[in-house]
Image (cartoon, rainbow, N blue to C red):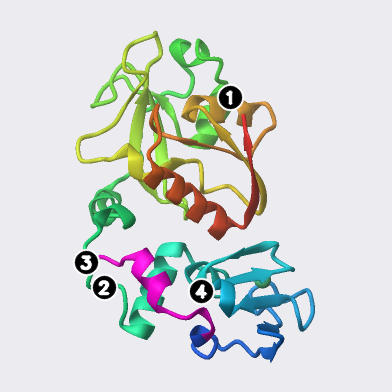
Amino acid sequence: MPFIDFAILKQRVAIESMLPALQLEMREAHGQYRGPCPACQSGGKRTLVVTPAKAAFYCFAGHTGGDVIALVAHVRDCSMKEAAKFLAEETGQGREADDRRRTVPEERSKEVARSLQPLAYLQADHDSVAGLGLAPETCQAFGAGYAPKGIMRGRLAIPIRDGQGKLVAYCGQAVNGDSPELIFPNGFDPREHLFHTEDIGEGEVVLMHDPLEVMLAWQNGIANGVSFLTETVLPHQLEILAAFMDKARCEQLELA
Ligand SMILES: [Zn+2]
């Protein structure tokens, strides 16, 4: 997979040059383009604003804005990564770089996802699960449970899903104070994933400490929690979070 450099794309692709490719019908006035937003389909004929001098857009209906990549993502209702790919294909720019930090290597996790089936032997009703404060119903809703065998043996196995709900991997939460708190299968990079993105709708999302807290909060009526899978967070993970929020149309992040 060729690497796409976001910075080069932003530098070389004039935001107004993408209006035809995005089939946006906009009128120019006072150095700005304004038109209806095909993604939001509300807000009237002037809701989408593209300002070439700032290389930026804003959508009053969607309460969102950003650079040319964000514009493509908003109008086409896709992730930032898909938007960058679209831009690279439309313009021929951005592909020559190999700044790997700016890209999301997902081929490996896709391979894992392709063959992964839910573990049938997990026990939602188990003393050590109850000891974490989790009800069996909560475990069932998440597809989690105590693993009496396998690589998560002796831990609470919690499924990690992609934004579409597809099972990507299980992580293993310690149930008796074991260290580390969370373990992952070989070949799975926890820095490339967020927990519980599959059920989040538009509006607000709450960033929690870990998957266990997300499940406990869910059990107690807070359904819009997500978490990273690591103790510390790299800038790259923040980009993944931002791209997720953009795609899910979450306007605000609350810190738990
Ligand atoms: Zn919009």
- How many neighbours does mark 2 have within 10 angstroms: few (below 14), some (14-19), or many (20 or more)? some
From mark 2 to mark 3, how far is it between C-alphas?
A: 10 Å
From mark 1 to mark 4, how far is it between C-alphas?
A: 36 Å
Reading the image, the residue beneath label 1 is: 216
Left or right: 33 as drawn, with respect to 8: right
Tag 3 near tag 1, CB within 8 Å:
no
* Percent position of residue 199, x then y: 57, 47
Reading the image, the residue beneath label 2 is: 95
Point 33% across, 38% down: residue: 190
Left or right: 146 as drawn, with respect to 208: left
Point 29% across, 31% down: residue: 184
- The amino acid pointed to by label 3 is Met
Reading the image, the residue beneath label 3 is: 1
- Residue 118 is drawn in which quadrant? top left
Looking at the image, tell me whether mark 3 or mark 1 is earlier in sequence order: 3
Instruction: Determine if the magenta segment contains residue 49.
Output: no
